[in-house]
Image: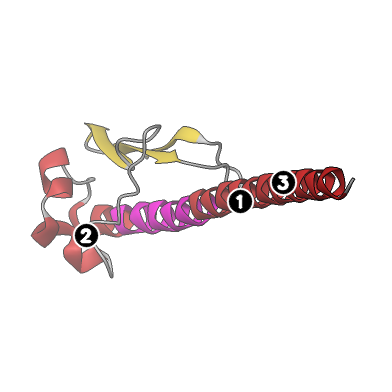
Amino acid sequence: MRIDRLAIMFKNYIINYFVLALALGFFLFLSRAGWHQALKVKQSQVAVVNVLALEQGLQFFKNDYDRFPKVSEFADNSTLAIYFSAFPPKEFNSKDCPLSYVYKRPSLTSFELSFCLAAKTGKFKEGWNKIVNSN
């Protein structure tokens, strides 16, 4: 009888530890998922701030030269660094966003600035977005 009682207690301890380990694992999984999502949102917010600063800097360049920069000028840090406090902007690469920013100049008086966000931020959707400016 004593052995049966010990076996039942041991079985209850095993079940309790299993449930505790399962709950802890689930909590850690949810915490990690929440942390990852919060990081994606924060990176997307920074990317949007960078894009809006890029748009303003490109307007300053146009005011000085009566045109938007060529793609080669946009890629050249020394050419555009005077228009930005930090250039080039920080890249946030991920599986879904291998590049953060892509600049194109279809004509002297227009540009397209595409940017990829890991999470929806403000009026911009998750994934690729585009700012088109033509004067």
Q: Inspect the image, locate mark 3, and give the three-letter code of the amino acid beneath it.
A: Ile
- Residue name at image x 55 percent, y 51 percent: 32
Circle nearer the viewer, 3 or 2: 3
Residue at mark 2: 64
Q: Which mark is residue 14?
A: 3
- Occupied quadrant, residue 26: top right
**Mark 2 surroundings: few (<14), some (14-19) or many (≥20) residues within 10 A:** few
- Residue name at image x 19 percent, y 46 percent: 69
Q: Is residue 4 magenta?
A: no
SS at circle 3:
helix
SS at circle 2:
helix
- Left or right placement of residue 89 versus residue 38 in this view: left
Q: Which residues are magenta?
A: 41-58
Q: Which mark is residue 34?
A: 1
- Residue name at image x 39 percent, y 56 percent: 50
Q: Nearer the viewer, residue 60 or 49?
A: 49
Asked if 71 appears above or below 37 in the picture, the reply is above
What is the x, y in percent for residue 30?
64, 47
Q: Are marks 3 and 2 in contact (CB under 8 Å)?
A: no
**Mark 1 surroundings: few (<14), some (14-19) or many (≥20) residues within 10 A:** few
Q: Inspect the image, locate mark 1, and give the three-letter code of the amino acid beneath it.
A: Gly
Q: Which mark is residue 24?
A: none
- Left or right placement of residue 99 versus residue 49 in this view: left
Q: CA distance from mark 1 to mark 3?
A: 30 Å
